[in-house]
Amino acid sequence: MTNNQKNMMLFKVINRLQLRDGVLMCKKPSGRSLQKAHYKQGDLDGACGAYSISIVLNILGVFEADNLYSDSDSEKVDNRKAEWRLINALNEQGLYRDGLDSSEIQEILSENYSKYVTTQCAIKKEHDLVELATAWLDKNIPAIVRISYDNNNSHWVVAVGYGIDENENVCALLTLDPGNDSPTYCLWNGILDLKKHPRKKYAYKYYSPRQVWVDMEEVVIITPK
């Protein structure tokens, strides 16, 4: 085995994504056409959780995130429809200065979109988060992952695949990060390196596009009904 082969990483990505002319796409709920899969949050908000919800629902084919940006008059919105109730719930907090925690994500979806999806949350004290995320990725279900930079700052990203090293161990999560530009040449725009530093509390390197040290705190799994 050569050195290049020794250090080679294999990538596995859910089958719900495709690049079309440099744009990351997924199927619309109708299944007959495609929609944009990734959306970038604003520079001044903490809406990564809301964007991650939208990205996952988009990828699962149970939502059209373009409707979040619709110019429709709010008086014309049919509040009886689950999609519009969800949009109103996601818009409710404006800039999301304090972000969303997992219980709020679960509450938003259970109260407004339970007809289409179920939601489960896992924390690192109770679960092997990497094992949980990769198990669902093997079923082509993306996983929302919360990474923390310190005691006060964290960020939600969407895991859409993983890397496998030469020993067939999972060594990285491939993410769609709502804080970054949409990918144009591959199916992800962030990488969470799972080689843990033994002496650091924030022991994983996250590349997206700059390198930062993070911890993996929670995973939220949304599955279609």
Image (tube, grey):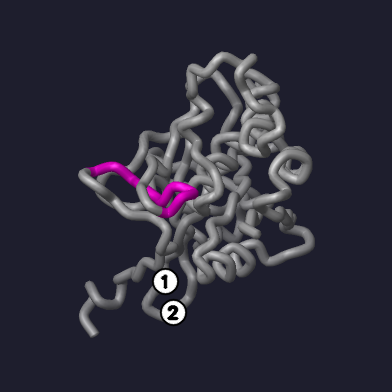
- Residue 81 image point, x, y percent: 66, 36
Specify the quadrant of the image occupied by residue 152.
top right
Residue 138, placed above or below residue 151: below
Label 1 with label 2: CB-CB less than 8 Å: yes
Along the viewing direction, whichever of 166 and 188 lies nearer the viewer: 188
Give, as a three-letter code, the residue at label 1.
Ile
- Residue 109 image point, x, y percent: 71, 43
Q: Residues within 10 Å of mark 1 (few under 14, many from 20)?
A: some
Q: Which residues are magenta?
A: 22-31
- Would you name the residue on which mark 1 appears? 164
> Residue at the location (38% across, 52% down)?
32
Along the viewing direction, whichever of 56 and 130 lies nearer the viewer: 56
Question: Relative to residue 197, is residue 165 drawn left or right?
Answer: left
> Residue at the location (55% across, 49% down)?
62
The residue tagged with tag 1: helix, strand or loop? Answer: strand
> Mark 1 to mark 2: distance in Å?
5 Å
Along the viewing direction, whichever of 19 and 192 lies nearer the viewer: 19
- Residue 194 image point, x, y percent: 51, 61
